[in-house]
Image (tube, rainbow, N blue to C red):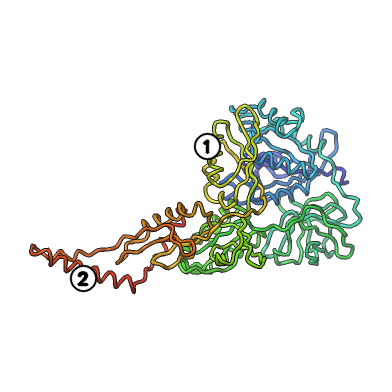
Amino acid sequence: MPHKYTRNFCIIAHVDHGKTTLSDRLLEHTNTVEQRVLTDQHLDAMDLEKERGITIKSHPVTMNYRSKDGHTYKINLMDTPGHVDFSYEVSRSLAACEGAVLLIDAAQGVEAQTVANAHLAFGQNLKVIPVINKIDLPSANLDLCLKQLEDILAISAEEAILASGKAGIGIVDILEAVVQRVPPPRWTDYPQARALVFDSLYDSYRGVISYVRVFSGSLKAHEFMLLMSNNAKSEIKEVGVFSPKMEKRDVLGAGDVGYVVSNIKDPSEIKIGDTLTLSNRPATEMLPGYKEVRPMVFCGLYPVESSDYEKLKAALGRLRLNDSAFIYSSESSVALGFGFRCGFLGLLHMEIIQERIRREHDVEIISTYPSVVYHIIKHGGVKIDVDNPVNLPDPGEIIEIREPTIKAAIHIPNDSVGDIMSLVMEKRGTVDHTDTLDATRIMLTCALPLNEILVDFNDRLKSITHGYGSMDYELGEYRAADLVKMEILVNNDPVDAFASIVHRDKAEGKGRELCEKLADIIPPQMFKVAIQAAIGGKIIARDNVKEMRKDVTSKCYGGDISRKRKLLDKQKEGKKKMKQFGRVSIPSDAFIKVLKTN
């Protein structure tokens, strides 16, 4: 088919605005998947995706559609993840398209990620087709959505298509709009072959399978390909398209979206956003937009049962094969034994990996407090990166500690403004400016330290706004801050599992909270045990673990008080001696309880 009859587009939206349901209707209408095998959320392969109603892994599909103008068009749809953690994957999926269908929930209107994804699409110069979805809901407010479309996104309301993925309304209008409004494939006249790698998958039999969009030239089996970011060469074993299962083809031409199976067995060699070309006639310049994806959030993962260590190691190895953004390395902790230091793109990414380890690999794990990557400037101008509080240098060696910040766009109802501003300030953030979206909603543009939003920020945002608030963020710059390493001492011995990097102003409150929690959870000991929070050599908070006491006076019946006093003094001396030589062994389930409540 000539490439002028090819259309490449993706569907972008805020989480839970109906992307996957709409994809199902498009597959059904174009007869790409037979009715008898079509399932709900057909393009979502993982149980986790179906349960949570989110797309984690991108799923392309090729459809044939006969338009009202009499021509048959080849339409390549790229389903994209909706969450902010995967924004680089979304940007690469967008780079593989010429158009984007922007979904807006008729009941909820324009949300934070709707705006962020729309700006990503505008930045890639894509033709954006606005679709107001879920118009059959009783709570749908079409007038408000159309007004928001013009006021917030500067898209004419006349361009909007009214649809419902569930009821199958407006599906033909969307397909016609894709065919008529989205331009044919670009950059097809480039002299050499170039294809964008927008995702990859590891197959234990065939090695690494690259998902590609061919921009110019063609790719065939038995040719030799070259990856331009690292100059890795390999023979192409097979090419094909998704419909939506993999189907072998003789050739992938300009404008096609499909897969390439090569000799490469190591997933780390194929990077998302890389340009693939032919080694005998290589392209001279890469396709724009490639960058290395770096993990932003780190935490330690340890097996609850130490005998599960090898099982956890195998599970992490398998997950790493299909997720190049996830990294891990071995580490050990005095309190928790042997485990792994893992790096993730963000909080959702961390949560999903942990859930998959528990479900797919049947390993019960405990994770330490999440931390971010800090830049440490030492005397002599030496700069090091620290992602684990245990590795922080001595305070005397440090000139300054810089922490990563984020730029957040928070969409909230008007009546929550005061409470959200208090929350932002509590998290050491600043509100740069506010924009009124409509009569009931406001957008706050804030700068916040990434470390402060790791644990409970999103939960508190949702509870303050009764579920109506939404947030989108992008990474900002590194800023200097008054940060310190807080350690927890149990009977004067530091416990590495509870070490954390905190702001000096918040250290005392956090230290007191953690000491109280530990004092409740650690079982009573034979002698009084002090639990202390310390910064350097200074103790900032303390609590005591209850001591067990034998009633030594129980055998005294009547008689002089001095006899009881003598017995109690003898016990006191014994406790003092025990404290001098005794060690406190804390059961691992106590750590697990504290870390889980964190």
User: Which quarter of the figure has residue 131?
Assistant: top right
Residue 17 placed where, x, y %?
63, 38
Which residue ends up furthest to the bottom in the rendered image? 581
- Specify few, some or many for label 1: CA neighbours under 10 Å numbering under 14, 14-19, or 20 or more: few
Which residue ends up furthest to the left in the rendered image? 559
Q: Is residue 344 visible?
A: yes
- Specify few, some or many for label 2: CA neighbours under 10 Å numbering under 14, 14-19, or 20 or more: few
Nearest to N terminus: mark 2 or mark 1: 1
Q: Residue at image x 66%, y 27%?
A: 144
Q: Residue at image x 76%, y 67%?
A: 263
Which residue is denoted by mark 2 in the rendering?
570
User: Which quarter of the figure has residue 412?
Assistant: top right
Seen in the picture, residue 185 relative to 532 is either above or below; the reply is above
Residue 541 placed where, x, y %?
41, 57
Left-right relation of 210 to 451 = right
Residue 391 placed where, x, y %?
56, 66
Which residue is denoted by mark 1 in the rendering?
419
Name the mark nearer the viewer: 2 or 1: 2
Residue 577 — which label? Answer: none
Q: Amino acid at mark 2?
A: Lys
Residue 567 placed where, x, y %?
17, 68
Left-right relation of 22 to 7 = left
Q: Secondary structure at mark 1?
A: helix
Q: Residue at image x 72%, y 58%?
A: 292
Seen in the picture, residue 96 relative to 181 is either above or below; the reply is below
Q: Amino acid at mark 1?
A: Asp
Seen in the picture, residue 349 relative to 65 is either above or below; the reply is below
